Amino acid sequence: MFEKLYLIDFVVFLILIVLWAVAANRLSRLPFRYTKKELKQSIKRSTILFVAAQAMVIAELVLLVLLGTYGWEFIKEKVLLTMPLFIPSACSTLVPLSFMRKIAGQITDDLQSAVDERDRMLLASPKFILPIQAALISSILGCYFSYFIYPFELNVLNAVILWIAFALMLGALWFRQKRYSAKRLQTHFKVTSSARLLRTILSFVFLAILIGGWYTLSMKASVLPDHMNMGSMHHNEMNMQTMSHAMDTKEISVTSLTGPLTEKIDRHFELVAQKTQVELSSGKTMEAWTFNGTAPGPELRVKQGEMVEVVLKNKDIEDGVTVHWHGYNVPNAEDGVAGVTQDSVPPGKPMSTVFKPNKWERIGTIPINNRRNK
């Protein structure tokens, strides 16, 4: 269910970006409507876009709550980084909506007459255009930080930098719109054919940049396949059957680089990889891959100089499992990188890792994990 909610959330963000972009484009054209009838019809169509966009905003907030039921870790980046931009921006769009309803309500008769100059000035003002632009930018930022560069380091500095950049963008757009409004007022909001052509070209350029950026980021995020069966990976698939010693031309098989096999074992541990239903802090239950039925797995406590043996058993994970050691020197053939230093361990075939923590090894806590494509 979590995966479906995650996908729906991504789709909602994309729909929001499209709706806000189309709405911003339509709002920017309102001051150039010649008759009151044309203006009223355009306001009606723009209002439909606003309602649809606000419905997507509500859907996004509902999805945020639902995702939060799986744990704070799944939503904290959104809540602390992008939602402080997204929610106020979405609420601010009610301002231009109220302006449009007020103007449309005043148009009751003489529909073929020209639009009032004061209405044109209001429709071209920054306070009318900027909220929709803010909503569009905040939606793009929310989608980008949630789905294209996630995970990232969340800290106060990153948040402040993002918020300042957002404020600077809005400030620049405010002054640009103010200048644009004053310039159009001088020409009585008449648009030449060359201006229309330039506007069309810029719209297509913006659309091309948006699609191209999305495609590039998607390709970058999809360099690796979304699933990899480690049970089907062997050394020869990555041309790693043998390794050349740096000081010798003799080839040495990776599989021969194991730990001592004849010395007395001081510490013996067994890790059983298995599928287990685990309860999250939110109270939700989900299936997880665990060691010895717990997440995280058991602590393996040893002393320097002791000979350690860790036996990995695979109970029911068909894709195969390994144990990879972070920041610790273990025999290369037993380092747990499936398809590179060893084959993965299938169900029913245990594998032993034997090593001795010597005095030059680091002292402290190190993590171990199953090494597979994430």
Image: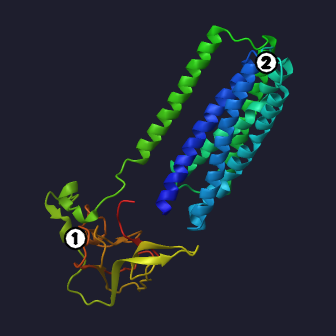
Q: Nearer the viewer, residue 308 or 344?
A: 344
Residue in the image at 30% along x and 79% along y: 315
Q: Nearer the viewer, residue 320 or 368?
A: 320
342 relative to 42, above or below:
below
Of circles 1 and 2, which is in front?
2
Q: Which type of secondary structure does the marked residue at label 2 adopt?
A: loop
Q: Residues within 10 Å of mark 2 (few under 14, many from 20)?
A: some
Residue 111, disc: 2
Q: Is residue 296 visible?
A: no
Which quarter of the rendering shows the C terminus? Answer: bottom left
**Image spot of residue 265 (x, y percent):** 28, 89
Please state which amino acid type lies under the numbered disc 2. Leu
Residue in the image at 21% along x and 82% along y: 261
192 relative to 51, above or below:
above
- Between marks 1 and 2, how big is the CA–CA gap? 87 Å
Left or right of 321 on screen, residue 178: right
**Image spot of residue 221 (x, y percent):** 43, 47
Q: Which quadrant would residue 368 be assigned to in this image?
A: bottom left
Residue indicated by mark 1: 257
Please state which amino acid type lies under the numbered disc 1. Leu
Residue 83, disc: none
Left or right of 258 on screen, residue 64: right
Q: Which type of secondary structure does the marked residue at label 1 adopt?
A: loop
Q: Which quadrant would residue 264 be assigned to in this image?
A: bottom left
**Image spot of residue 193 (x, y percent):** 63, 9
Task: Of the two numbered discs 1 and 2 on the same chain, state the one appearing first in sequence.
Answer: 2
